[in-house]
Image: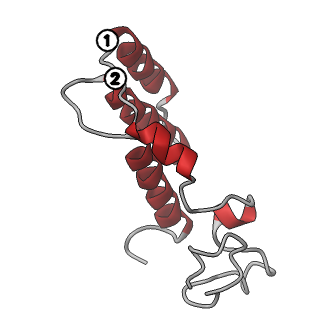
């Protein structure tokens, strides 16, 4: 069993875990927030639902994404997430809420480690 499978985040510590450097706090922000990193069944059920194409919702989300995009990396990330969510309402795009969640989680873990180069 790995730390990802264990919601407490206790098992599997040590490999690439900077918690010792941070005063014992878990290195994974999901674990620190008490969030189970495994996608719950309810979310996967929702991911199977279809999002009908809706140009109005898609354009609204993309406008908000443009409005929040700024110079900081956080605003750029939020903008990218909103734009990706807008893809749910675009018939030309193929994505799901689960894919978006997993992608965002991956990006946040890379950012936490200081980037891809580390």
Tell me the quarter of the picture where residue 100 sits: top left
In the rendered view, would you say 66 is above or below 96?
A: above
- Residue at the image position 62 percent from the left and 91 percent from the top: 14
Residue 24: give its label.
none
Contact check, label 2 and label 1, Cβ < 8 Å:
yes
- Residue at the image position 56 percent from the left and 85 percent from the top: 1
> Which residue position is annotated with label 1?
55
87 to the left or right of 63: left
Residue 11, x across and y down, in percent: 66, 85
In the rendered view, would you say 90 is above or below 109?
A: above
Residue 23, x across and y down, in percent: 81, 80
60 to the left or right of 75: left
> Mark 2 packing: few (<14 Cα in 10 Å), some, or many (20+)?
many
Residue 10, x across and y down, in percent: 71, 82
Count of residue discs: 2
Instruction: Tell which of 32 and 40 is nearer to you.
Output: 40
Farthest bottom residue? 14
Residue 89: give its label.
2
Farthest left residue? 92
Tell me the quarter of the picture where residue 106 sits: bottom left
Instruction: Tell which of 12 and 47 is nearer to you.
Output: 47
24 to the left or right of 80: right
């Amino acid at each position: 069993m790995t730390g990802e499978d264990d919601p407490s985040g206790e098992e599997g510590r040590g490999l690439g875990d900077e918690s010792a450097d941070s005063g014992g706090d878990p290195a994974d922000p999901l674990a620190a927030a008490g969030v189970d990193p495994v996608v719950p069944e309810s979310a996967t059920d929702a991911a199977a639902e279809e999002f009908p194409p809706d140009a109005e919702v898609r354009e609204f989300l993309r406008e908000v994404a443009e409005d929040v995009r700024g110079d900081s990396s956080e605003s750029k990330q939020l903008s990218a997430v909103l734009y990706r969510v807008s893809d749910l309402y675009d018939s030309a795009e193929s994505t799901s809420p689960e894919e978006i969640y997993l992608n965002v989680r991956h990006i946040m873990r890379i950012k936490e480690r200081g980037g891809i180069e580390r």
